[in-house]
Image (cartoon, rainbow, N blue to C red):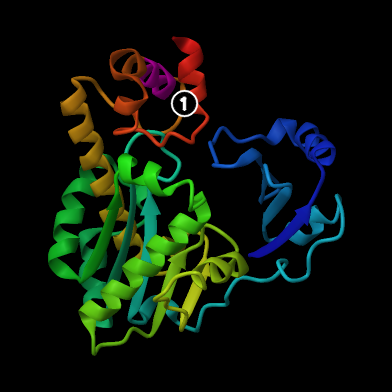
Amino acid sequence: MSFAVLKLSKTDIQKLKNYYSDYLLNKNVPYSEFSAKKNGVNITAYTSGKVLFQGNNAEQEAARWGKTDPTTAKKSSTLPKDFASLAVLGSDEVGNGSYFGPLCVCAAYADKEHLADLRQLGVKDSKMLTDSQIRAMAVKIKELIPFKLLVVNPEKYNAIQPQYNAVRMKVALHNQAIRLLLEQISPTKPDAILIDQFTSEANYLKYVKQEAQRVEQKIYFVTKGEQYHLSVAAASIISRASFLEELDKASLELGTKVPSGAGRSSDELAAKLLRQGGIALLNKYAKLHFANTEKAKKLI
């Protein structure tokens, strides 16, 4: 997996969007102009003018549009040999792309003695499991291995979001969850730390330096980290179960089904909440900086 970053003008970003029009993704990435995927390369253009290319041919794809920044175009960490059998602390997050509900970040530690037990439970990529399987499996995982779960509800998220952009917030939460779990399992030390990659390694390290207490040693970054170690898969399942639980609570409080994601149903519910209690009510349940907020206002 490689990365490449370009700094482009608004005019050039519009040219990119037109070029990738047949490959656009229906996903809401905070502070982005658009996201697309072509030939295995993910392209995300941000309002800042930066364009991030991620994938095995990222540098070649980026070269179509200009010269990449050598400080940001770099290979992700190469995992040690037999990584799947090592004692690893893995972390993952859920809820970042959903308008309603919290941002949940979990770090989980799977030592060599518990890997077979996790496999027997059926632990794997949470996207391959049903919600009911995730809920049931999370309970068993929590009983089996150490973990640290951080849940940032929408109200708290909205309070800190102006100071922390989406990436910096996730960096801070991953760092905190990892640090707290390392303290919890001390004096045991994992063979490695694996973060399910959500930004370039250089970007992560840039933001983590702003944290007062930071973990930087033995950290590896890889997309789809749950495929490389069960600790990340376990963290993903715990995070997803917590996210679903919080949506259930919100649904009970509001007396209506609260959707995940950031689609039309989210716009319609947001408009309903704005009619009922204004922005103060919506603030309790939704991440206000998403484009859905403005869409909801237009529906009223």
Left or right: 225 as drawn, with respect to 207: left
Identify whether 193 is placed above or below 151.
below
Point out residue 198 in the picture as x, y percentages from the top left corner. Answer: 52, 57
Image quadrant holding the N terminus, namely bottom right
Point out residue 76 in the picture as x, y percentages from the top left corner. Answer: 61, 70
For image coordinates 25% across by 58% down, the residue present is: 122
* Disc 1 element: helix
Left or right: 154 as drawn, with respect to 250: right
Q: Residue furthest top?
A: 300
Left or right: 291 as drawn, with respect to 18: left
Would you identify the image quadrant in which residue 266 lies?
Answer: top left
**Residue nearer the viewer, 87 or 253:** 253
**Residue nearer the viewer, 157 or 113:** 157
Residue 57 visible, this angle:
no
Would you identify the image quadrant in which residue 277 lies?
Answer: top left
Image quadrant holding the C terminus, namely top left
Point out residue 22 in the picture as x, y percentages from the top left corner. Answer: 72, 31
What secondary structure do most residues of the magenta stretch adopt?
helix
For image coordinates 28% across by 73% down, the residue present is: 180
* Range of magenta residues: 265-271
Identify whether 165 is placed above or below 119.
above
* Number of other residues with Cα within 10 Å of mark 1, as a class: few under 14, some 14 to 19, many 20 or more: many
Residue 12 visible, this angle:
yes
User: Which residue is the site of mark 1?
Assistant: 293
For image coordinates 73% across by 31% down, the residue present is: 21
**Residue nearer the viewer, 271 or 34:** 271
Residue 80 part of the magenta-drawn span: no
Specify the amino acid type for callout 1: Thr
Identify whether 272 is placed above or below 72.
above
